[in-house]
Every structure is written in C-alpha cells, then in structure tokens.
C-alpha cells in the first residue's frame, strides 16, 4: 500500500515541488492550500503523470476550525498519514521594526507559527496512536539568523526552529521522526507575496546569482523521508552556492 503524505501550501513553489516529488516516489497525497483551482490542476497533473491518488483540501491554516473540519475527520483510507510536511508560510513586507505594518505581522505569525501548530495538533495524535510518522517542518535560514528588516518573519522562523526541537522531544517516545529543512533563497512566489504583487521588486531579489529551485528543497525532503526508520535527519540547511549567510550573497 502506498504511504500517505500531507503537504500544506501545495498550490505553489516548494510545496508544489514536494508534492510532485513524493508522487513520483509513489506516495498518495493530501494536498492543501487556499486556492482550490490550483489544487485541482495539480491533482490532474499528478494523476496524469503518476499512479497515485490525490485528495485536495482547500482551507486556511490560520483558521483552527477550518483545519479541524478538513483534517480532523478524514475518510478512513486517508486517515493514516505517514508524512506531514508543514510548508505553508509567507513573508509579508520588509520594513524596519518602527515602520512595521501590524496586519503584516499578524499574517506572518498566524500563518507560519499558529497555522503550523493547528495542523500539527490535528494530525499528530493519529501518528502517536499508530506510533509511526514523520513530520517535516519547512523553516528557513531566517530561523537561524536575523537580517535587517526581517524582524517578524525571522521571529516566526525562529519559532519554527524551537517547535521542531520541541516536537522531536515530545514525540520521541512514539518513534515519530521530526525533520526541519531550512532553505536559503528559493525562487518561488515567495517574494511576489512579500512585496504584495510587485513583480519587479520580487525579481530583483534573485538577480545576479543562481537561487535554489523549489525542486532542490523537494530533493532534501525526499532524502529525509527515504532514510531507514532508525535514521532521523534532524536539520538541513540548504543554501544557494552564491549565498553564504542570510544577507551575504555573491552577485555578478
Ligand atoms: P510560495 O508563495 O510560492 O508558496 C506558499 C504556499 O503557502 C502557497 O501554496 C500558499 O497557498 C500557502 N499558504 C500561504 N498562506 C496560507 C494560508 N493562510 N493557508 C493555507 N496555505 C497558505 O512560497 P514558497 O514555496 O517559497 O514558501 C513555502 C515555505 O518555504 C514557506 O514556509 C516559506 O517561509 C519557506 N521558505 C521559503 C524560502 C524562499 O526563498 N522561497 C526560503 C526559506 C523558507 P495559497 O495561497 O493557495 O493558500
Ligand atoms: C525565506 C528566505 O531571504 O527571507 O525564508 O530568509 S529569506
């Protein structure tokens, strides 16, 4: 029987690439995000290319009621989730702290921290019951370092770093693996979202060097999930060759 992976934020970027990669490796997928039409087209694409089943669930990870309604009572054939990829997340804005937009802060904290918690709280009890499972948290270099005007986004990813460590401790008695993957700059819709649709400003982020592709992070996730059961890859920092630290790039 195929294993089941649940990926949040599968409608774009890293989550979409992880979904494609795990489908290629024979997983059945629960793909989630807010944009149903994108979930539908990803499901169609995956089912065209691979012999796997795909369940789409559109909900907002910031709404605990929606998370519980979508994931708390899955049909029995989908309930035994083997791999949870907590990927949904975003940066909004890039302002110094004294010019921060409070609504942007709320969106980042609600999505990156509370959303990840809501999904984990709903899915992990089944893993505990089955004494089996693997949780992958997509954190960031921004969870290891802080950069100017990154303040709240960096704080949310530092929170993910703490939660990955805490989950690993709490889930240890149940044989559940917890892996954190921390990417550097990956060219996705991330910067378009951060700059609120300003594509010109988003493009500038990736000029003069070769950023990571979402597929590079999907490879890292697959490396972690394909290890034998006694091996837990705890933390992976994956950077572009041209990026030495959060704000140190070699640009041509
Ligand atoms: P994208 O903007 O391309 O994708 C983000 C995904 O998150 C989308 O599928 C979006 O789906 C989903 N999402 C956002 N908010 C919500 C919400 N409230 N409820 C449900 N789903 C939501 O960005 P990336 O692929 O780059 O980002 C994925 C993760 O990787 C994030 O956690 C990000 O912080 C992290 N990361 C990204 C890096 C980069 O340089 N790109 C580097 C390091 C980490 P929808 O809009 O349909 O809801
Ligand atoms: C996303 C990349 O540059 O904001 O986590 O750290 S960055």
Image (tube, grey):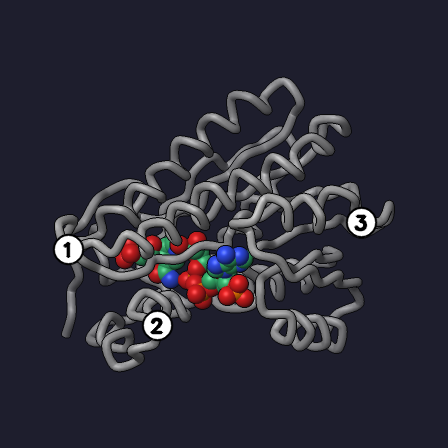
**What residue is shown with label 1?**
99
**Label pair 1/3, CB-CB below 8 angstroms:** no
Residue occupying the point 75% across, 70% down: 50
Mark 2 or mark 1: whose residue is earlier in sequence: 1
Examine the rendered structure and indicate whether residue 165 appears above or below residue 13: above
Q: Which mark is residue 78?
A: 3
Left or right of residue 107, residue 241 in this image: left
Q: CA distance from mark 1 to mark 3?
A: 45 Å
Cβ(mark 2) to ligand 1 < 8 Å?
yes
Residue occupying the point 36% across, 46% down: 237
Q: Nearer the viewer, residue 113 or 209?
A: 113
> Residue 88's x, y, as percent?
50, 55
Mark 3 or mark 2: whose residue is earlier in sequence: 3
Q: Which mark is residue 192?
A: 2
Examine the rendered structure and indicate whether residue 39 appears above or below residue 8: below
Note whether residue 218 is visible: no
**Label pair 3/2, CB-CB below 8 angstroms:** no
Label 2: which secondary element: helix
Categorize mark 1 by other alpha carbons within 10 Å: few (<14), some (14-19), many (20+). Answer: few
Label 1: which secondary element: helix
> Residue 124's x, y, as percent?
65, 34
Left or right of residue 180, residue 184 in this image: left
Categorize mark 3 by other alpha carbons within 10 Å: few (<14), some (14-19), many (20+). Answer: many
């Amino acid at each position: 029987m195929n294993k089941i992976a649940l990926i949040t934020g599968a409608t774009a970027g890293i989550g979409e690439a992880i979904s494609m990669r795990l489908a290629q490796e024979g997983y059945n997928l629960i793909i989630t995000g807010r944009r149903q039409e994108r979930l539908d087209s990803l499901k169609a694409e995956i089912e065209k290319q691979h012999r796997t089943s795909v369940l789409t669930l559109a909900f907002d990870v910031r709404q605990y009621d929606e998370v519980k309604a979508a994931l708390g009572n899955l049909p029995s054939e989908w309930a035994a989730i083997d791999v949870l990829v907590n990927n949904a997340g975003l940066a909004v804005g890039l302002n110094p702290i004294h010019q921060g937009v409070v609504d942007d802060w709320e969106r980042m904290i609600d999505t990156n921290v509370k959303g990840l918690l809501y999904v984990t709280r709903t899915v992990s009890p089944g893993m505990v019951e089955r004494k089996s499972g693997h949780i992958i948290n997509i954190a960031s270099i921004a969870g290891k370092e802080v950069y100017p005007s990154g303040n709240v986004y960096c704080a949310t990813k530092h929170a993910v770093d703490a939660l990955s460590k805490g989950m690993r401790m709490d889930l240890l008695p149940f044989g559940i693996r917890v892996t954190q993957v921390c990417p550097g700059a990956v060219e996705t819709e991330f910067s378009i979202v951060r700059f609120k649709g300003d594509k010109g400003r988003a493009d500038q982020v990736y000029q003069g060097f070769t950023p990571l592709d979402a597929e590079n992070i999907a490879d890292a996730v697959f490396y972690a999930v394909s290890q034998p059961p006694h091996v837990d890859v705890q933390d992976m920092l994956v950077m572009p060759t041209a990026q030495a630290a959060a704000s140190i790039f070699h640009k041509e």
